[in-house]
Amino acid sequence: MQLINNILSSFKRELHEIIHDRLYRAIMLVIPFVMILFFTLMFYRGEIVDLPIAVVDKSHSPMSRKLLTMIDATQGVKIAYETQSIEEAKELMLHGKALAIIYIDKDFEPNIFGGIPTKVKGYTLGTNISADGVIESNIQQAVMTLSSGITLNKLQAMGVGHNEAVVEIIPINILSHIVANPYLNYGYYLAPLFMFMGIVILTVVSTIYAFGRELRYSTALEWLNASQNSMPAAVIGKMLPVTIIMTIMIQLILFILMFIMGMECSGSYLYITLSSILFIIAYQSVAITIILLTSNLRLGLSLGGGYAVMAFTFSGITFPVTAMFDAIQPLSKLFPLSYFSEIFIDQMMLGAPISYDTPKTLILMLFILLIAFIWRRLNRVVHNEKYWRKD
Amino acid sequence: MKSIGEKIDINDASIINKSDFLNIIRDEFKMIISDGGVLLIVVFAMLIYTTIYSLAYGSEVVERVSIAVIDNDNSTSSRAMINGLRSGPNTEVCYEVENMPEAKHLFYSRDIFGIVVIPSGFERDIIAGTQTNISTILDGSHLLLYKQVLEQTTEDVLTYSASVEAMHLVACGANDIESEDIIQPVAYEWHILNNPSMGYGSFVMPSIIVVIIQQTLLIGLGMLGVRRRTLANTQTNVAMSVFAKLLVYISIYGINLIIILGVLWPLFGFPYNGKTIDVIVVMMLYIIASSALALTISHLFKRREAPLMLLLWSSIPILLLAGVSYPMQAFPKWLYLIGRVFPSSSAVNAYVNIGTAGASLSDVATDIYTLLALAILYIITAIVMEYKYLLSYRK
């Protein structure tokens, strides 16, 4: 009971600090909202549609027009320019006006009717992987549809019945089932993980600041006194506001994903929420370790900030960890985001049984144990003046 | 280091001469070197980050993504199909499992990222000339992995499918050449002009180094600005002081860029297709514009810890706003236009086009003019802020 009272008084002191310190207030109450708003606006649309491309149609034939109409009708691509030469089209691409070029040779139609296999060529700059992927698959699809149509006509001309001809063209049909993100919405894939990344940065930075400012401005003993000199109460009371605010922010993110962006939760929402709390405390524990080891607010912020940002790369959100060099792969284990992002994907998108995620949750708890290892250092740093006032 | 501020009597305008310019440069270097935090961010962060990111993205391509196959037919044809799936290179058949629960277990454990199911009756249907189905189950939660599995399995099935088709046609009396035309009269050929491996590192690294330059300048100079003011280090000739400082940052970041583009780039095989003189023009303008922006906003911070706390999170939004790594067509136009106030937006576009796609300066003229305008604007604001501070200090 005494402990709870002590925690409460430490907690109250911390709230008071947050309200009266402009920097603390900004990082806890203003920036999180700005960040979440930004990513919501950025990924709200979610799908990449009507990417502008340029075409060079040397054929000018009914067949080439047919193909271009089919390409234009795809969801991802829009024919924005028609130029006379490939050089002209390339210039449009370098100016960022077109993202790809389709080139149709002048022999396009004669070849088709003459029974000579012909090619449609596509060019991109290779500077934008996500756009290139969408363009490539859309054009591929249009060309294949045209090609199959031509084959169908030829076979029918040869006297093959329609149904037999279809089997002839597609003897093996591919039925693709996409799990986790059936409409391949880029927003569903990127928005949550970018937002969690933002939460990681803000959690680490604000926790380092919460502890570091007591050393930097020599108020460590004042802080300890507020909890009747109970170190556990002082630490918990200090961590709690960050834990609570960032947990609320994750709830806000989940709310936006589900009710504004239309994502559906196919697993356990409760499990995501409970893991999110552990995820935040895990990052707070690492942050506390960093600030105590450096006992220097600014150095702690620089190192902690660097660590937080690294999670973006090493959690494999954008580039999969399994594709990295073998020696680099183990690094991904050092970031709580790696575990939480998998838990989120499993529970939100895949609907995997919880048993697959319990080991990940246990590892998040291991991060929290870091505080136990740093406890002696904590006592020393708080009581010894030589660790204070470092700038 | 306290002597920096005391050396100059700000009320004595007669002391301004040529050597003053050099003094400011020397003092600026001293300020950077004497402050570990600033040194780490302004001088070393760029090298450290670039090296770490290069190591992470250096393998470039996503290959041999593991998949599982469920063969419900166990026939010569299904074996042939599986051999086709084994040919790679983008996927690797790591498991052949008996049933869906087993495959699901592997899927949830992240041992595999795709499942291919061959139905029973597969061979029978092929021989009878009826259409048969192959099911693929793909993971849409990671788009790069999804794309590799989708493309490779589709290609493998189509290849096998074409051989079945050719067999049928030849059986119907067509010769080999005719059957090739009948199967695929129009093919599609895809050329990537400058990033032939479609490598992730080659795609993302140029944008990353550009953004790091601006962000480290904003944070580092913000810290330095607070210190400068606590030392009362002011110059009477504010314009000269601003230009001298710009020169300092051009030299620091210039040397960093030479190391990065000259050593790390060839080491990791990232593309560099532009003319060096064009790259120098873009980077010079960019470093000037972002240093001047950094000097301007450095006056807004009261405490040295503030710049990092307030600005660090913005790095990813700023990268996205450039509209290069995530296509600008996919987010609101007004958001993209707001992003243009950051020098990084124009510089990312200009540098990616020149460095990766081999564009010339005239191709990226809009970006160059924007950078020039931003450089002039932010130099003026930097001078104004410095001047305002000088006035308040004199009072």
Image: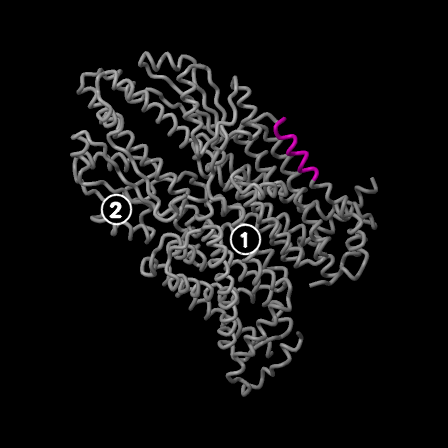
Q: Give above or below for B146 relative to A220.
A: above
Q: Name the image quarter holding residue A268.
A: top right
Image point 38% across, 19% down: which residue?
A: B133
| Residue A247, visible in the rendered structure | no
Name the subunit of mark 1. Answer: B
Horizontal arrangement in the rendering, residue B185 relative to residue B278 (left or right): left
Q: Give above or below for A261 relative to B327.
A: above
Where's residue B261, x and y in %?
47, 58
Name the subunit of mark 2. Answer: A
Q: Secondary structure at mark 1?
A: helix
As for residue A6 lying within the magenta part, the answer is no
Q: Which residue is mark 2?
A: A81
Where's residue A221, x and y in %?
80, 56
Residue nearer the viewer, A91 or A5: A91
Image quarter hosting the N terminus of chain B: bottom right
Horizontal arrangement in the rendering, residue A332 relative to residue A75 (left or right): right
Packing grade of label 2 (10 A; few <14, some 14-19, many >=20) is some
Please report the bounds of the magenta region as a residue range: A355-366
Numbered label attached to residue A23: none
Q: Amino acid at mark 2?
A: Tyr
Q: Amino acid at mark 1?
A: Thr
Q: Which residue is mark 1?
A: B51
